[in-house]
Image: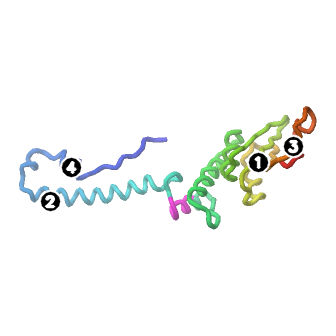
Amino acid sequence: MGKTPVQIDHTTREFDNRIDLFKKAVPRTDVLMLALTNQNNDIEEMFFDLLTKRSIDNATGINLDIIGKIIGLSRYSGQTDTSYRLDLKAWVKYLFSQGEINTLTFVLQNLTDSVNVILEEYFPGAVIMFFDGTILNADNLHNIMDNTAAGGIRLDLIWFDSDRFRYDSGPGFDIGLYAFAIGGW
């Protein structure tokens, strides 16, 4: 990304940069300069707000809704700005995804507010993702995750909670493609 923008105080800058002739001039020139530079400060503040408060990281309320409308993801009723901001970031990752593992994990983690996301790859072309978050709309979640994965990859999502049951004795039910699905994963 680019440099962080810095807001300029035009009044201070103009008074510091005026020539000696105006420094010694009548106080009316100071009043005139103050009137002109205050207008510039107002314009600077307005443009600075546009520059800094219209990004996903800094926008709030209606500005965040407008960003969501632009990229095609609406806020669900009662959703907080923080939650919606995470959804928008995940949506942007989804839009630019080419099936990378980090992107799959990031999108699933943010769409479900998961603490634990485990991704396992199986040859040829299968991925199982385990997660412990909240599912608001299972069909929508699976469609988004399926579109985030690379073409031709089978993606299975398995939700688990912290009180899961599974066998822990040696080889057998604990290994293989769907080992964790047996006990509630």
Tell whether label 4 touches label 2 (CB within 8 Å). no
* Label 3 secondary element: loop
Tell whether label 1 touches label 3 (CB within 8 Å). no
- Which residue is situated farthest in the bottom direction here? 77
Q: Earlier in the sequence, mark 1 or mark 2?
A: 2
Give residue 31's mark. 2
Q: Earlier in the sequence, mark 2 or mark 4?
A: 4
Tell whether label 3 touches label 4 (CB within 8 Å). no
Closest to the observer, 98 or 23: 23
Q: Which residues are magenta?
A: 60-67
Instruction: Identify the residue position indicated by label 1 in the image.
Output: 162
Instruction: Identify the residue position indicated by label 3 in the image.
Output: 166
Disc 4 from disc 3: Cα separation = 72 Å
Give residue 14's mark. 4
**Majority SS type along the magenta span:** helix
Residue beneath the point at 85% across and 49% down: 184
Q: x and y percent of residue 182 in the render?
A: 89, 46
- Label 1: few (<14), some or many (≥20) within 10 Å? few
Query: Disc 1 residue type?
Result: Ser
Closest to the observer, 155 or 69: 155
Q: x and y percent of residue 15 in the render?
A: 18, 49
Tell me: 169 left or right of 86. Answer: right
- Label 3: few (<14), some or many (≥20) within 10 Å? some
Residue beneath the point at 82% across and 38% down: 125
Query: Disc 2 residue type?
Result: Val
Query: Disc 4 residue type?
Result: Glu
Q: Nearer the viewer, mark 4 or mark 3?
A: 3
